């Protein structure tokens, strides 16, 4: 009985030690930090500038590789940098939304990377697109 309790105690101590080691290793490597999780366009007119920028910083100690940026639909087009982000450096992710669509905006972009903290980071854009005002200054041709 004493032998079984001793063996079980060793097993528990070994598991705690392994878990602590795993947490330390997870703290090393690339770490993704983003300046904001959501970009709010507010209310904008149809056809307006649907571009925004998210700033990604590598707060880890190894290069951060952004392998993929994918919008939740074809109206949201992200652009990720192709080169690795060095430790302590920043890069820009540009997102363009098709503002010809009238109505609310609530879209996401998934960033896939080698980050130890969040290998699949989701950022969002939101806002409202209102229809263009009708042009009241139209010139009608006159008959001669």
Image (cartoon, rainbow, N blue to C red):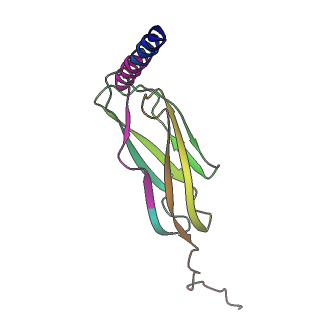
Task: List x then y, in percent, for residue 112.
Answer: 52, 33
Residue 126 sits inside the magenta stretch: no
Q: Quadrant of residue 130?
A: bottom right
In the rendered structure, the answer to whether residue 111 lies left or right of residue 27 reads right
Q: What is the quadrant of the C terminus in the image?
A: bottom right
Residue 106 occupies quadrant: bottom right
Q: Nearer the viewer, residue 110 or 76?
A: 110
Who is closer to the viewer here, 119 or 64?
119
Could you say which quadrant of the image residue 97 lies in? bottom right
Q: Is residue 6 above or below residue 109?
A: above
Query: Residue placed at 67% from the left, 90% from the top?
Result: 142
Residue 115 horizontal/vertical position (percent):
43, 29
Residue 2 in the figure: left or right of residue 75: left
Residue closer to the observer: 38 or 138: 38
Residue under the point 28% across and 30% down: 88
**144, above or below 112, in the image:** below
Q: Position of residue 17 (x, y in %)?
A: 37, 17
Q: Does residue 94 lie above or below 13 as drawn?
A: below
The residue most toward the front is: 1
Q: Is residue 89 left or right of residue 92?
A: left
Part of the protein shown in magenta: 15-40
Asked if residue 36 lies in the magenta stretch, the reply is yes
Q: Hey, which residue is sitting farthest top in the picture? A: 3
Residue at 42% in and 50% down: 37
């Amino acid at each position: 009985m004493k032998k079984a309790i001793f063996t079980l105690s060793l097993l528990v101590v070994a598991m705690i030690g392994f878990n602590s080691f795993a947490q330390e290793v997870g703290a090393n490597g690339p770490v993704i930090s983003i300046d904001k999780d959501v970009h709010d366009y507010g209310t904008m007119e149809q056809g307006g500038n649907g571009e925004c920028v998210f700033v990604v910083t590598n707060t880890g100690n190894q290069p951060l590789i952004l392998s993929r940026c994918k919008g939740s639909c074809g109206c949201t087009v992200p652009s990720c940098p192709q080169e690795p982000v060095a430790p302590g450096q920043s890069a820009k992710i540009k997102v363009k939304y098709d503002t010809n669509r009238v109505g609310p905006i609530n879209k996401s972009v998934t960033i896939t990377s080698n980050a130890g903290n969040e290998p699949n980071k989701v950022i969002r854009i939101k806002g409202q697109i209102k229809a263009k005002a009708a042009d009241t200054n139209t010139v009608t041709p006159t008959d001669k």
